[in-house]
Amino acid sequence: MLSTKQNDLLLVPYDFTKEADTALAHASGIAKTGSDSVRLLHVINRETRARLKKEGISEEDLKQKMAAIASANTEQTGVQTAWHVVEGSIFSSIAEDAKASNADLIVLGTHGVSGMQHVLGADVIRILEKCHVPGIVVQQKKIDENGYNHIVLPIDENRFGKNKISYAVAMARYFDAKVHVYSDYSSDEFIAKAIKNNAAQAMETLRKHGIPGEHISQENDDEDFDYALVRYAVSIDAELIVISSRPDERNMAGLLFGRVEEEVINNEAMIPVLVVNPKQDVSHLSIDISTW
């Protein structure tokens, strides 16, 4: 898939909701492009048990449903799909299973209070922060038959953005996509210079790896960056936005961290968001950003 490995694995936390089905479709679309495999994971917790009891579903019934869904997905998509059921907390079990199964990417659905496990935007951040690999967060927007052709990479003044640039390049390389670098606006001269330098570095990295790209700057601060970012992504029919999760502890001022990341993940346009931890090891991607 994105790395130089063969037969990568995509982990899909699955709770029988529409969003989980969408996540499975995205994971299958990605895996099919690279002849990779998918693993469904259902976490049984107190909330799940209460729901199962209310609906009269036994744990064995649940496992049979998981097996049937995995089998049907394998048959319909040609993507080898396994399944697993564990007992625990989604905030620890997903990360543990991702590590144990040597997963390369997590594809996770986010939804409101109607779902079996109520995975909200803030929950997604907590889950992915514990994982050794990044995650694509989806709502109910289906994956395009050609994958992700237009990828938006937001840039601010934070200097710990190497990882998200690496993954944007890797994803673009995988789908022959174009990357749209969208940079923040600041009236502060020092911050504006930092943003400009970061954007230039991102564009240079795209050029170095033969990725088509363009740079667009937010023109003013009349609109919050998260809303401007999503509005721009909608205007170009982007299929994916790539952001970082929490910042390095040395710099807590990065704009696309904390309060804003949840807004981007929960965007009303339902554009999938690839969330990359700044501390994750990206050496397997073989993307050089040595001058950052």
Image: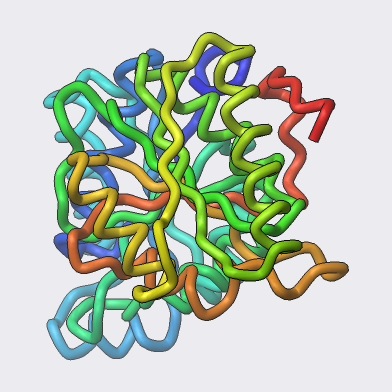
Q: Is residue 242 above or below residue 43?
A: above
Q: Is residue 8 above or below residue 156?
A: above
The residue shown at (34%, 42%) is: 240
Q: Quadrant of the C terminus?
A: top right
Q: Is residue 132 above or below residue 251?
A: above
**Residue 37 visible in image:** yes
Question: Horizontally, is 248 left or right of 233 in the view?
Answer: right
The residue shown at (68%, 33%) is: 201
Name the quadrant containing residue 93: bottom right
Judge by depth and name the residue closer to the eye, 138 or 194: 194
Q: Position of residue 157 (x, y in %)?
A: 67, 58
The residue shown at (40%, 58%) is: 219
Coloring scheme of the render? rainbow
Q: Position of residue 28 (x, y in %)?
A: 28, 31
The residue shown at (80%, 68%) is: 251
Q: Position of residue 42 (x, y in %)?
A: 39, 60
Judge by depth and name the residue closer to the eye, 70 or 25: 25
Q: Is residue 265 above or below residue 104?
A: below
Judge by depth and name the residue closer to the eye, 164 or 18: 164
Question: Horizontally, is 169 left or right of 119 in the view?
Answer: right
**Residue 44 visible in image:** no
What is the total number of numbered labels drawn onto the structure image?
0
Q: Position of residue 60 (x, y in %)?
A: 29, 63
Judge by depth and name the residue closer to the eye, 31 or 84: 31
Question: Horizontally, is 89 left or right of 58 in the view?
Answer: right
